[in-house]
Amino acid sequence: MSSLAEEFAQIFPDEVVTHAHVREVTLPHAAGTMALITLDNGHDHTRPNTFGPRGLAELDAALDQVLDRDDIAAVGIIGKPFVLAAGADITGMPRITTREHARAIARYGHEVFGKLGDGRKPTFAFINGLAIGGGLEIALHCTYRTVLASAPAVAFSECFLGILPGWGGTWLLPNLIGADGAVQIIVENALNNNRMLRGPQLEPLGLADATFDGVDFLERSLDWAARVLTGQVEVRRPTIDRGEAWDAAVARGRAFVENKLHGAAPAPLRALDIIEAAKTCSKQEGFALEEEALADLLMTEEFRASLYAFDLVQKRAKRPVGAPDASLARPVTKVGIVGAGLMASQLALLFARRLLVPVVLTDIDDERVAKGLAWVRAEVDKLQAKGRLSADQANRVKSLVTGSTDKSIYAGCDLVLEAVFEEMKVKQQVFAELETIVSDECVLATNTSSLSVTTMASKLAHPERVVGLHFFNPVSVMPLVEVVRAERTDDATLATAFAVAKTLKKNAILVKDAPAFVVNRVLTRFMGEVMRCVDEGTPVEVADKAVLPLGLPMPPFVLLQLVGPAVALHVAETLHEAFPDRFYVSPNLQRLVAANKPGLWSWNEQGQPFLDDETKALLEQGSSASTEEQVRERAMAAVADEARRMLEDGVVAEPQDIDLAMILGAGWPFHMGGVTPYLDRSGLSEKVTGRRFLPRGLASLPG
């Protein structure tokens, strides 16, 4: 092991080493012998290969062993089953405390991976599954690439985490496929919720030279490699357009980043700088730019917050704090959904598709039921058309969802979830009816977004089997479920709720039965303060732009349009009733609802929002306008105050649960760490609440 590797080994004491096993393979077609290196960390598919200092050192030694041998015709790289590699081992990244160390780790990756592309021998990457970050970079360093058609995830996720592909990817990719594809993969896909490519997409993009499927992927890849080596197959790659198209792609990327982040995180712009330079600079110069950029970005607070957020999503989300023993969960063999509106129909499709059990829904008339069932069937058809479901799977899901106006169809259900109008008396009446139909052990769940689950269950003979299962819209996309424990919810009911959420492939967090739970409570306090600024006299345009520098998924009044003013007003009024001193009910929001307006904004033909004359006439504003900075600080100060109060009230166990909820339920960005790391580093935590939320160093630079 080199001195550099030994030095880094001290920083990564818990590294799970990805070994580089070398075996010699006699290629067909008299092509000679290939040294095939298999990357394998010795764990099953639940822990993908990653590259830490010891793993890099082992790969380095393996490459040195074979690249200079005259009897070796080519070198191949493959991973353990279904995984090439998931990139750098990020567990030790928080321990990198100096820019010199950060730059050195980038240089070490270039040094090792670079041996695959130094021209000594033809090199082949066989992308046999997941290839993310450094896993994709090692493939790019190779001369040729094949990919498994069923590979589920190929991506550069670095910009999503606040860094950039720093082991060659930012320079190599545009020089392989052009700037347009590189901007899409490195920047746009990463910032679009870390969008992944699938195996069949790689070859058309130029990322792979051949695509094979089936259990004989390696055999077919080796045969193809042999034919390349013997000249039977000629790999042709298109000439890269290094003119205006390159510049236009970079300009598009910059506009995309500005629209998405508004300067909130530096990584994507640094990546675009290198893509721009890659148009003319040499590989050596490009790698040097990557090293400098990675050295800077590994030192940023945004990266530290992203690591913290990544850890929450990868670990805490999979082991919900406070969840009862899973063995207490009851089997769920039939599900009922009360309601057939859009939310209820989305839920019916989700339960049928994931649980593969009969799902029955009801509504007050046949027309509503028929509309709900038609929506489910249409969505199944769309999934089939996209290749997400086979014809047999589609037919099965459709057959599982049935409907009626007669609630007696809920007999035999193990779980019934109500998704009706947000009115306490209506929900209490629904549960009272259900209790006369279902068994005593049937779980009764509510999808309420703000009402008390305890009150909802208070008049039932068995309130212990009532639980909140708050899903977020759109149901198929949003990964969070808030599992709400009412005052009398028992452990078996709660365990069943968590088990169902897991089977639905959702991340569940346990929350106390408190008004609006977590996500809606934070968002309502946040939105209320922004709306208060408008009511006081701040122009709508100023208030809406004020929070853009936070890099949130959308401006507040675009979110209002998405949620709907009536829903936002209902939640605000519910919270104002519970906490009148903190939750503001805007008279202007009330006017919008009374006028049946879909929001503050209208939209022009270019898709730009504007305040139309009719809406403008509805607004009554004071004369005290705030600046963008003042609006932003007031809104986030309100969030800091509410987060502290939720923790003091025991709504969730720890600040990490608030952060996880905001990331998964509201799409708040990794570079904020959800919310509390941002509040800590901005000073608002101490200014508003007198103390930090997290121990110093947990989601920030040490010191």
Image: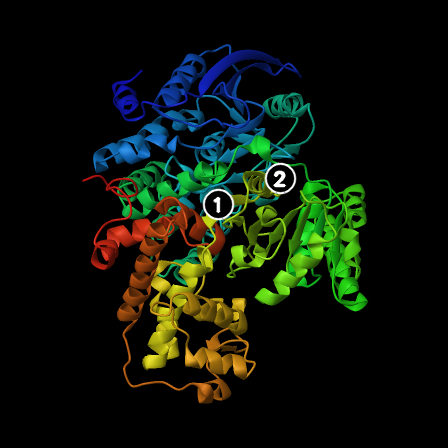
Q: Residue at x 36, y 48 (%)?
A: 673
Q: Is residue 597 left or right of residue 356?
A: left
Going by the numbered disc 1, the residue's amino acid type is Ile
**Residue occupied by mark 1:** 509
**Dividing the picture into quarters, in which one does residue 645 lie?**
bottom left
Does 300 appear above or below 62?
below
Task: Name the residue nearer the viewer: 688 or 292.
Answer: 688
What colouring does the structure picture have?
rainbow
- The quadrant of the picture occupied by the C terminus is top left
Label 1 Cα crowd, 10 Å radius (few <14 / some 14-19 / many 20+): many
Going by the numbered disc 2, the residue's amino acid type is Thr
Does 304 appear above or below 14?
below
Q: Is residue 126 left or right of residue 620?
A: right
Residue 631, x across and y down, in percent: 30, 70
Secondary structure under tag 2 reads helix
**Dividing the picture into quarters, in which one does residue 426 lie?**
bottom right
Q: Residue at x 30, y 35 (%)?
A: 94
The earlier-in-sequence mark between 2 and 1 is 2
Q: Residue at x 30, y 31 (%)?
A: 105
**Residue occupied by mark 2:** 503
- The quadrant of the picture occupied by the N terminus is top left
Task: Name the residue nearer the viewer: 142 or 235.
Answer: 142
Residue 517, x across and y down, in percent: 46, 55
Residue 478, x across and y down, in percent: 55, 52
In this view, the residue farthest toward the left is: 703
